[in-house]
Image: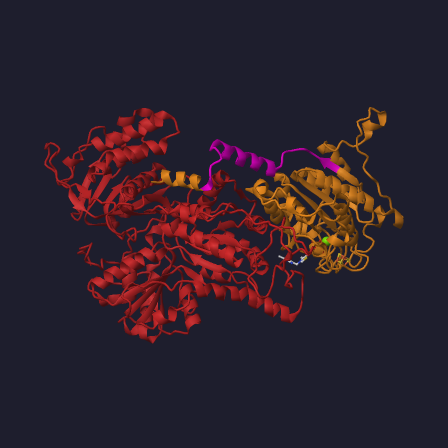
Amino acid sequence: MNPTPSLPETNFVPGSPERADLRPESIDDAVIRLAGNSQDGIQSAGAFLARLAGRSDQDVMTYMTIPATISGGPSIFQVRIGSGEVLSAGDEADFLVAFYQHSYQDHIGFLREGGVLLYDSDNVDPNLDDKRFVYVGVPITGLTVEALGGTAKDKGKNIFVLGLISKIFHLDVEKMKKLITEKFAGKDESIVNTALMAFQAGYAYPVGNVLSKQYQFEHVVKKPGAPDQITMDGNQALAYGLIAAGVRYGAGYPITPWSSVMETLRRELPKYGGLFVQAEDELAAVSITLGFSYSGHLAVTGSAGPGISLKTEAIGWASMAEIPMLIINVQRGGPSTGLPTNVEQSDLFQAIYGGHGDSPRVVLAAKTVEDCFYIAVEAARIARQYSTPVFILSDTSLATRIEAFDEPKLADLMLDPKPDLSTIDTHKPYALDKITHHAPPGTRIRDGKYPLISGLEHDEFGHPTGSPKMHMAMTAKRRNKLRQLAEELPVPEIYGAEEGDTLLIGWGSTYGPIHDAVKRAREYNEKIGAIHLRHLHPLPNGLEDIFARFQRVVVVEMNDEGVYGFGQLATILRARYCEPKIESLTKTDGLTFRVREILEGIFHRKFPRLVAANGARPNGNGASSKTTDVPSTATATARAEAKVSPARDHAGDSTPTRPETYEAAIPSKSQDSTA
Amino acid sequence: MSTDTLTATAATEPPREKLTKKAITADHPTWCPGCGDFAVLACYYKVLEKRQIEHEKIVTLAGIGCSSRFPYFVNGHGAHFIHGRAVPLASGISLARPDLHVFLFGGDGDGFSIGGNHLDHGARKNINMTYVIMDNFVYGLTKKQTSPTSPIGFKSKTDPQGAIDQPVNAMKKLVASGATFVARTHASQVNHMIQMIERAMDHPGFSVIECLSECVEFFPGAFDSANPRKGGAFSVIEEKKYDNTPEDEFRHDVTDELAAYKLAQIPFPGVFGVFYQNDRPTKNALEKKWVDSTREKLGNPSDISVLQKTFDRMK
Ligand SMILES: Cc1ncc(C[n+]2csc(CCOP(=O)(O)OP(=O)(O)O)c2C)c(N)n1
Ligand code: SF4
Ligand SMILES: [Mg+2]
């Protein structure tokens, strides 16, 4: 432990006073990666940065990894703050904060050349001979203990670092202190004071002695009348979207990364007179949910893949009985327990087809944290309007990252969730000429004929029938309402080129990297565009017209290419459109797509300095292999080798590590010289 | 939310006709002639008629099995769910709709085997519902496989040499898992069954009745030993009357859990009546208390103001 500031390693003239006149460099985009152990509270430090950015009307996106071990473990939190549009959390960090030696070793590869390594000199001993980076050593542990006194030990390091960062980036200190105070409000007053002390200590550290440059984000001028920004993660956005949509009941069973949706709903719903219950298992959770929905209160259940598997039989019942219900799947790596804290999009087939029999259901996928909110609203509307189960697909990456977005206009959105129990004259629950709308129990029916809600094939009144004709008619009824829904779905907008050589198709959380990839490729004059599908089942009409305008159509998704060489959405699109030009770019390393991976996957060695392929590569008809000089078998082998990611060597740590075979592709950020 | 805010229409309606058996009868039951389940259905009609429980006050639910076909034969709101999961389905309805009386019917396989976990937890949580398990000691619908209550030695298609697994003791299981009303009756004893159903529905909480209901097709004569008309003895539990008589000392205290186990220990066909009853608060009441106090603390705000406040904190 070293209570006095250590001597800075570079960029520093010993003994010079802190430069008060330092002019901060104006920046519009910065990626800050905090690397430590989860018990150090790096998540909350990162969240403060994200929230501050949101309050300053900056765009912000975060990225974190969750250690699979209970007691914590290596973990990162990455914040990307921009004064313009921020689409992805960033391939590389401009600024790396390393709390431990392992944090340094695992993440230095993510620091861009010329980037700043801020490290705890009490714990980290970096290789100062590597001249690519700027080194700033601060005895974070020692100074935190000194500032807070012995009892706090080194708890508070995260807030100390927050002070340092606030100084370096000229963040609004008053706003930040207010955030800290708010966060700890309601707790013991001494906790607020301790946090503020730690912050102050970090802020007061003469970091100007060691870092010749300081930064300031370009000020974002809020347009008059523009909404405030709110900052939350994807699971919160789902929960609050459901609340806005009038969903007041639900049931679930804990599983990563879904649990925080249920925890939020359990805590929040009573405020609205509703209720979320923790069930004994997934089978009960979905059944309780169906009980809520049947009783007239559209309800929600959710899980990750393993739990969805258990709910499957009851979801088939919902489809047959035509009960509206919402099912959230926050996807993780599968199958089985799989990679519980990683990201994957491998449950699309399960959502669309999971279960026995022909059991139509609607499947939507959120593309961003903000979209988690709106997709929940839309899912609830569809469920009610079409009396159908609706899946909402999210994933680990959306669940754990924080974004700031425009505050939704609640006055236009909030729904009155009360069930309609008014007396009716007569009721046929399964009328063949209409979309089913159930009369919930409690409804008096004057003609005295009451409906039976049935999982057996039934007639229009819900009574069992074995009639082949009726099974055909009812099967068609259940399917046709999805066709009707497809009619009203908007045709997706094209991002980038409206026509040209390459169309990228994505779904779910890959929205950011895919759009960033389009942006970058257009800098190379590629004629490239992208569409992002939020409605996966049924698909919106009109996609074939978009496909027709491009030479190549590449579906980008985080799942396996399967036996036949195509990812899950690619398989569906090829089956649906019989379109041989649809290719597939997949990967299964459990990490979010990096922009470079997408570009490399699509264009191979087309651009200078794009070297070897890693976990992603397109598959397609003969046409696609013409665009590459690597025979597909060779690429497949290279890919197989790339599958062993060093990240997996840490028990449970899913921290992404730059794949060895990869080199910087895009000149705009990185000037990598090593080949 | 819940009942207080539900649209009440009754006041504007003309006076209702008396509820008759006819009004609550739907499809003709598909059970085999002589099946014990007919009697359970008849008793249910009787109770609804006697208590004049209108259609919109009840919901009749079931899982899967011969016995679980029950809701199709009742003209009233109802649902025929999936095998073993009717207790959680009923729990959702019960928790969201305190205005409804939730009735649930099913078999021994549905309740004690595939749905066994839900039975335990519904009981433990004391969710308000009335559940009649029509126990025939066999899988009827799937045509004679061993059930969790089949006696040792019972020859079924899955135990051609005779069942070898220890059967569930229904009364012990229900008391142990925390059900707050536990009773046992016999399909041939209609008056007793009606009494049990009425007491079960009047009990706030998880009320379960095991009704021995003969499967004439696959386990004929299974319950003759408790049927006086077949030469058996129907032994009814004598409950304490608190009348200060010396006999009362030997009568059963329904609140005494250990005494309930002792009764459950009596060899087959055992005794009939209320084994156990307890006034533990229901999950319905406890959740409602939490919801009400939460809203009260916030000053019973409008939904939009609650969410707006939450958003304000996220700025
Ligand atoms: C998930 C599932 N597994 C198995 C079945 C087949 N199945 C239907 S009823 C039944 C057993 C019924 O026995 P019980 O609950 O005792 O009812 P009973 O027919 O005897 O009244 C089984 C195994 C099913 N319908 N669903
Ligand atoms: S098979 Fe048995 S349980 Fe089923 S209806 Fe016939 S007699 Fe009743
Ligand atoms: Mg049975």
Displayed quadrant of residue A547: bottom left
Pick the quarter of the image with the N terminus of chain B. Answer: top right
Query: Which x, y percent locates residue A194?
Result: 31, 27
In-front residue for pair B45/A89:
B45
Colouring mode (rainbow / by chain / secondary structure / one colour): by chain
Farthest bottom residue in view: A622
Query: Which x, y percent locates residue A174?
Result: 25, 33
- Can you see residue B226? yes
Query: Which x, y percent locates residue B237?
Result: 81, 37
Chain drawn orange, letter? B
In-front residue for pair A332/A69:
A332
Does residue B264 appear to the left or right of A125 in the view shown? right
In-front residue for pair A233/A349:
A233
Displayed quadrant of residue A550: bottom left
Q: Is residue B277 magenta?
A: yes
Does residue A486 appear to the left or right of A215 in the view shown? right
Q: Is residue A487 above or below residue A150?
A: below
Chain drawn red, letter? A
Residue bounds of the magenta highlight: B275-303
Pick the quarter of the image with the C terminus of chain B. Answer: top left
Q: Is residue B218 magenta?
A: no
Query: Which x, y percent locates residue A23?
Result: 12, 40
Q: Residue at x 38, y 47 (%)?
A: A409
Does residue A484 appear to the left or right of B145 in the view shown? left
- Can you see residue A142? no
**In which of the image's four quarters is ligand 2 placed?**
bottom right
Displayed quadrant of residue A169: top left
Q: Is residue B258 above or below residue B196?
A: above
